[in-house]
Amino acid sequence: MVATTTQQSVILQGEPVAVKVYQSDHCKADAILVHGFTGSKEDFDFIGPLLAERGYRV
């Protein structure tokens, strides 16, 4: 038997910032990724989905 997981990403728009959240069906824990002053959410485009695949809400 092979388990399948569905992953989705949602952007929560606020003022003055937006937060992007990756979540899989079975979240076991939260992972908060914080970039530096000159960074952006795109810094985590690679690691965010990988963590979500492993059951973290990012």
Image (spheres, rainbow, N blue to C red):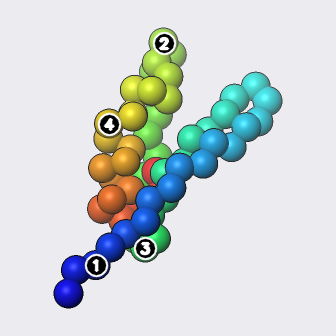
Relative horizontal placement of residue 18, taking residue 9 as reference (left or right): right
Q: What element carries label 3?
A: loop
- Residue 38 is labelled as 2
Residue 10 image offset from top left, x and y in percent: 60, 48
Q: Which of marks 3 and 2 is nearer the N terminus?
A: 3
Three-letter amino acid code at disc 2? Thr
Callout 3: 10 Å neighbours few (<14), some, many (20+)? some
Q: Which residue lies furthest to the top in this view?
A: 38
Q: Are marks 3 and 2 in contact (CB under 8 Å)?
A: no
Q: Is mark 2 on a helix, strand or loop?
A: loop
Mark 1 vs mark 2, CA separation in Å: 39 Å
Residue ID at (30%, 50%) = 50
Query: In this rendering, does residue 29 appear at all?
Result: no
What residue would you read off at disc 1? 3
Three-letter amino acid code at disc 1? Ala
Q: Residue furthest left?
A: 1
Three-letter amino acid code at disc 3? His
Callout 1: 10 Å neighbours few (<14), some, many (20+)? few
Mark 3 vs mark 2, CA separation in Å: 33 Å
Tell which tag, 3 or 2, sits nearer the viewer. 3
Q: Do the residues labelled 1 and 2 touch (CB within 8 Å)?
A: no
Q: Which of marks 4 and 3 is nearer the N terminus?
A: 3
What residue would you read off at disc 3? 26
Three-letter amino acid code at disc 4? Phe
Tell which tag, 1 or 2, sits nearer the viewer. 1
What residue would you read off at disc 4? 46
Q: Earlier in the sequence, mark 1 or mark 4?
A: 1
